[in-house]
Image: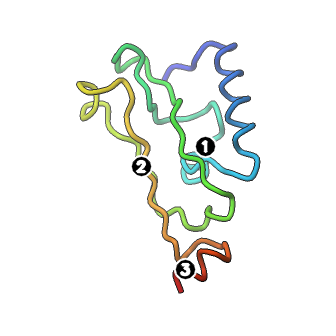
């Protein structure tokens, strides 16, 4: 996967870090990948498979980390005709979330 130009990458990373105050990226948590070192692209510049970047996220509250059961990134071959982005799909098990309101809702 190609890496976005330095200036854009830094600005994007800064934005993501600001959003993470009390939140986490489900993708990065699940796959144990650092910001800027993603192996699964979510955007293909001008629909070109060889110009993939990871720019789509699902942020969850920190206490939900234990509830993340699955994270999927859509396949280029299935989405290229309809979008230059692929979906990021996150499955969360409410019963595993370490957060009082959820423990009360899902005994």
Which residue is denoted by mark 3 in the rendering?
105
Q: Which mark is residue 89?
A: 2
Q: Position of residue 65 (x, y in %)?
A: 62, 62
Q: Are marks 1 and 2 in contact (CB under 8 Å)?
A: no
Q: Nearer the viewer, residue 53 or 101?
A: 101
* Circle 3 crowding by C-alpha within 10 Å: few under 14, some 14–19, many from 20: few
Quadrant of residue 34 in the image? top right
Quadrant of residue 74 in the image? top left
Q: Position of residue 98 (x, y in %)?
A: 65, 73
For marks 3 and 1 on the same chain, the one whose residue lies earlier in the sequence: 1
**Residue shown at 45%/31% (left/top)?**
41
**Residue shown at 65%/16% (left/top)?**
8
For marks 2 and 3 on the same chain, the one whose residue lies earlier in the sequence: 2
Q: Is residue 88 above or below residue 6?
A: below
C-alpha separation, residue under disc 3 versus residue under disc 1 = 32 Å
Which residue is denoted by mark 1 in the rendering?
33
**Residue shown at 46%/36% (left/top)?**
40
C-alpha separation, residue under disc 2 versus residue under disc 3 = 23 Å
**Residue shown at 67%/72% (left/top)?**
99
Q: Is residue 9 above or below residue 14?
A: above
């Amino acid at each position: 996967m190609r890496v976005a130009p330095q200036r854009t990458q830094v600005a994007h990373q800064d934005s993501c870090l600001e959003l993470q105050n009390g939140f986490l990226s489900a993708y990065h948590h699940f796959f144990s990948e650092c910001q800027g070192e993603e192996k699964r692209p979510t955007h293909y510049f001008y629909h070109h498979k060889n110009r993939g970047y990871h720019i789509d996220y699902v942020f969850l509250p920190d206490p939900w980390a234990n509830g993340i059961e699955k994270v999927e990134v859509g396949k280029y071959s299935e989405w290229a005709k309809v979008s230059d982005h692929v979906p990021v799909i996150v499955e969360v098990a409410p019963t595993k979330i370490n957060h009082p309101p959820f423990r009360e809702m899902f005994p």
